[in-house]
Amino acid sequence: MTELHKGISRRHVLAGTGAGALVVGLGVKPAAALETVRQGYQTNMWGMPTYYLLRSGLLEKHGVKFEEFAVPSGNLTMQQMVARQVDMGTYAGPSFAIGHDKGGLLAIAMIEYVGKTARVMARKDLGLTKVEQLKGLKVANQTGSSTGNIFVDQIATKAGLKKGDYQEIRMNVNDMVAAMAAKTVDAMVNVEPYNAIAEADGLANSISDFYDFDKLPVFMAATPEFVEKSPQTVVAYLKAWLEVAKDFKEQPKKVADTIYSFYTSKGYKMAPETFAKALARVEVQPGWPADLVPYMTHHSEILVQEKKIKAVPDWKKALRTEFLKQAGA
């Protein structure tokens, strides 16, 4: 396993002080007054827009300094934030609801939709075509993650499978393709680019797409202390995100090349076209869609029933919509 996946990678990036000096006389808060962001992100495809943000130079452009903390999946970032080890991080709705319940975490934007990146994949040699065929089989799942929760609580349940009908093998998403190749598991609940790698290598085929169940909005969350301490940093940070979204739309090759280099540098062997296909399943569009509160209420009610959170959050407190509005003004 790569060094990055074994632990937490950390990098310090300092914004230049020149830009700050130029604006002091204009009464604008200088870049030096902004807080350093301890940025958490996952190394699967869900975290790659954040990885691009960190490599694009756009944070520096807006005077934001950062340190980065990379982990295999977003629920680990959420746990780091509850422990106040990082300030910001991305994860899907269920993980955010848990993070808000356990640590008062706040959403500062819905960053992307990733429902097309998550699938249930079965070993190709087994010839499976439906989720219900997983009965009695070994299923690799990142337990506690948003995809893990949605698979157990919704996808498997709809297919008539309850806990105990299949053997859940707890595993990080980045270890699952190797487990499929070794035939130590029969199926996996995974995300891109690992699904595309498994398909391209002839190891697995898709038996369910999460998008049919859930568009999977991914939030950028922040600790309440960071938001209270430096709201101006949050706004500058989101200005950079709006430019990231523009790059995804207008310069897809530049984005793909930056992110592709991350995976190849970690030893993943993947054709550029396989990677481009995986990346195209991520829809980056920072915003606050109108259907978000009903969506989050639905997921939170499930989490309450499963005793994973105490109550449905007060969305007026949990979803801080004002910062993105200011960033886009």
Image (cartoon, rainbow, N blue to C red):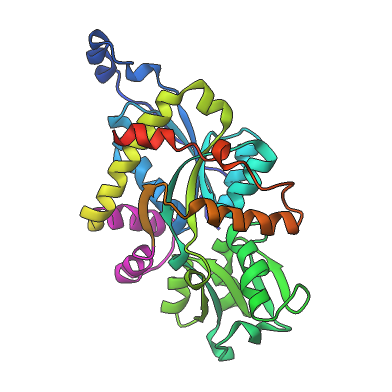
Q: What residue is at 37 percent from the left and 58 percent from the top? A: 283
Q: What residue is at 28 percent from the left and 42 percent from the top? A: 243
Between 28 and 143, the one lying in front of the other is 28
* Residue 110 against residue 283 in the figure, above or below: above
Q: What residue is at 60 percent from the left and 51 percent from the top? A: 95
| Residue range of the region highlighted in magenta in the rendering | 254-281
Residue 22 is situated, as x and y percent measured from the top left of the image, at 22, 14
**Residue 252 image-quadrant placement:** bottom left
Quadrant the N terminus occupies: bottom right
Residue 105 is situated, as x and y percent measured from the top left of the image, at 59, 38
Residue 107 seen in the current view: yes
Q: Main secondary structure of the magenta part?
A: helix
Residue 72 seen in the current view: no
Q: What residue is at 67 percent from the left and 61 percent from the top? A: 143
Residue 40 is situated, as x and y percent measured from the top left of the image, at 51, 41
The question of residue 165 being in magenta is answered with no
